[in-house]
Amino acid sequence: MKLDKPLIFFIAVLTFLGLFTFYGIYAILVVKDPIFYRFLFIKFLLGNVLLPFLFFFIFAFLKWSTIRKITLPFFLFSLIFTLLAFLPYFQLPGKESARWFYFKNISFQPTEFLKISTLLLIAFIVPLIKRGRDYLIITIFIIGSICVIIYKQPALSNLLIFLAGIAGGFFGLKFSFRNLLIIALIGILIFMIGLTQEYRVKRILSIFTTEGETAYQLKQARLAISSGGIYGKGFGKSEFKLIGIPLMMTDSIFAIYAEETGFIGSLALILIFILFLVIIFQKARLVKNEEKKFFVYGFGTMLSAQIYVHIIANLIVTTGVPLPFFSYGPSNAISLMIGLGIINSLEYS
């Protein structure tokens, strides 16, 4: 195995920044509840750092031919657990959505694995589409089915990120405009239907109101970001961590980072993310194999969309999308590192 040094460098930098930011939040909250938050920080180290890195190195060792063999089992595993999450018995207590699979104090988000496994599955089908119409129908059926499942959870933001990844893969291959148009129309249709969901309407209306939990979260996130000024208040010196921002360890963690590092630090983080994505897309450009090219372009686009949606959600409208390397969430972290491990292992042939 050859490690892609630029890729590893940016993974290490982003992991350090994410760990440092999360530790700053932990250091404030642990005073309020020492047992709970110390355990949570240990879970962050294990679930967001150590275990994802283990998966990175496992997949970095695998050859593309091996990945092809395990893709279908990986996809079926993700799909089964995603569907099981719709059953009340396996739903996370206190949650109305079906995004989490829960069983005996063990919970994870199978959709995170479903997105990347579907991207891999489509990558292996793509070269076959040219051989006949049947493969195109199969591809559309798979994409459509996954869209319906994610929509019904409901998780509109995740759905749009998934579709962005699929579209990015096809764009990278310079696929036919007709196929891209079909995916775009499906995405627009689902987005328009999604706007009729009550929870989504409330989040959109939170832009214009100051009432309700969603509006409060958005207001606090905006205030935290703006209070950081040009240079920020310094690492670990966020005042809004004391006041409290809803979901500041997950959905609103960028607001805490922006408050502590200011405009300069936020701009630097965005630049780091951009350079990181440039490395990924550069590898996609150099890869000649269609399957590999589709996956890398798709994964890079999916990652770009996730970063963009999280940052925008802290400024315009709230949504449950984690910031890669920063937000607490083992499922997303492991899925991210699986994808990066695959990218690291790819040869340019």
Image (spheres, rainbow, N blue to C red):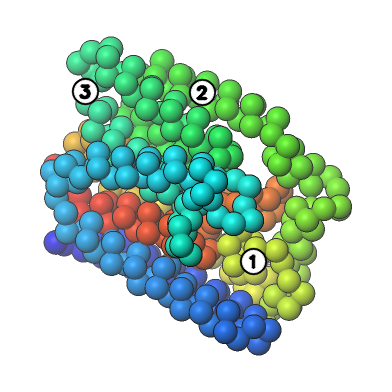
The residue that appears at 48% across and 56% down in the rendered structure is 102
Q: Which residue is mark 1?
A: 248
As drawn, 30 above or below 16: below
* In-front residue for pair 193/165: 193
Residue 124 location in percent, x, y?
A: 23, 33
Q: Residue furthest top?
A: 133
Residue 270 location in percent, x, y?
A: 53, 59
Q: Which residue is mark 2?
A: 186
* In-front residue for pair 6/185: 185
Q: Which residue is mark 3?
A: 128
As drawn, 37 above or below 68: below
* Inter-mark Cα distance, 3 to 2: 22 Å
The residue that appears at 46% across and 19% down in the rendered structure is 181
Q: Tell me if label 1 and label 3 are in contact, CB under 8 Å.
A: no
Residue 17 location in percent, x, y?
A: 49, 72
Q: Is residue 320 visible?
A: yes
The crowd level at tag 1 (other Cα within 10 Å; few <14, some 14-19, many 20+) is many
The residue that appears at 38% across and 40% down in the rendered structure is 79
